[in-house]
Amino acid sequence: MGEMNEELANVILENALANNQMTSPKIQADIKHCYAQEVIKQILEELGDDIFSLLVDESCDVSKKEQMAVVIRFVDKVGIVKECFIRLVHVKETSTITLKTDIDDILARYGLSLKRIRGQGYDRASNMSGEFNGLRALILKENVSAFYVHCFAHQLQLVVVAVAHKHTPIWRVFETITCLTNFVCASSKRQDMLHESQRRQLEKMEDVLCTGSGLNQEMTLPKPGDTCWKKSF
């Protein structure tokens, strides 16, 4: 195309102006931020001035930073129930007052009012669902119509965990995995033996092995995630 069009040839390849920074992390972050704003704008337009429910949960990310996820649940104009993620914020502490302040800031940012909340959904952590001092109680003081419901997903998880604890082969699997992980990761020599064994396995699979950037990297054994499976026996 450059050979056929002189104007195009003047701005491509070695003649490019060098001001297209689409691969720059900063520019990519700006683009993602713009997309996020457009998505949030669409969600708020669907919600309009209607009422909604508030769903909040918190957990640590891989860098061990405490993150709070905020979701709103509402019924759109055609009667479809929607749950829309609107914000993920880093919280330096998980006290009730801090969480309440952050939620107030998020709602104010998007022009939402606590008075429009008709439901709250959290897990059973005391700072979230505490009847007297939890986030649930603080919101109820400002809006008595914000009824609390224990998160059904968390209830299901608790049921599955309780059933698994009654089934000996299941909890023994998790117990064995934890012991093996601790045993191997406690010694660099054992980890070297594991890597060597893995290398030999990869050599056998060389003909069918998928290769590429980031694949087949040496890594330590990941420990079981922080969840309700952990229990002393």
Image: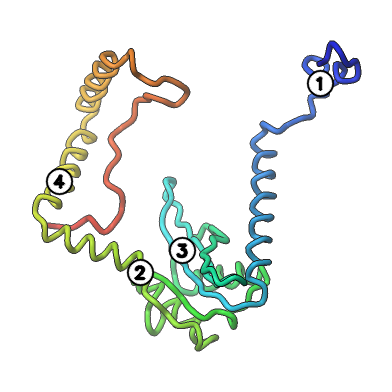
Q: Amino acid at mark 4?
A: Val
Q: Which residue is mark 1?
A: 16
Dot 4 alpha-carbon crowd within 10 angstroms: few under 14, some 14 to 19, many 20 or more = few
Nearer the camera: disc 1 or disc 2: 2
Nearer the camera: disc 4 or disc 2: 2
Dot 1 alpha-carbon crowd within 10 angstroms: few under 14, some 14 to 19, many 20 or more = few
Structural distance between the alpha carbons of marks 3 and 1: 49 Å
Q: Which residue is mark 2?
A: 152
Q: Amino acid at mark 1?
A: Ala
Which secondary structure lies at badge 4? Answer: helix
For the residue pair 225 and 13, the one nearer the viewer reads as: 13
Q: Amino acid at mark 2?
A: Phe
For the residue pair 45 and 229, the one nearer the viewer reads as: 45
Dot 2 or dot 3, earlier in sequence: 3
Dot 1 or dot 2, earlier in sequence: 1
Dot 3 or dot 4, earlier in sequence: 3
Structural distance between the alpha carbons of marks 3 and 4: 34 Å
Which secondary structure lies at badge 2? Answer: helix
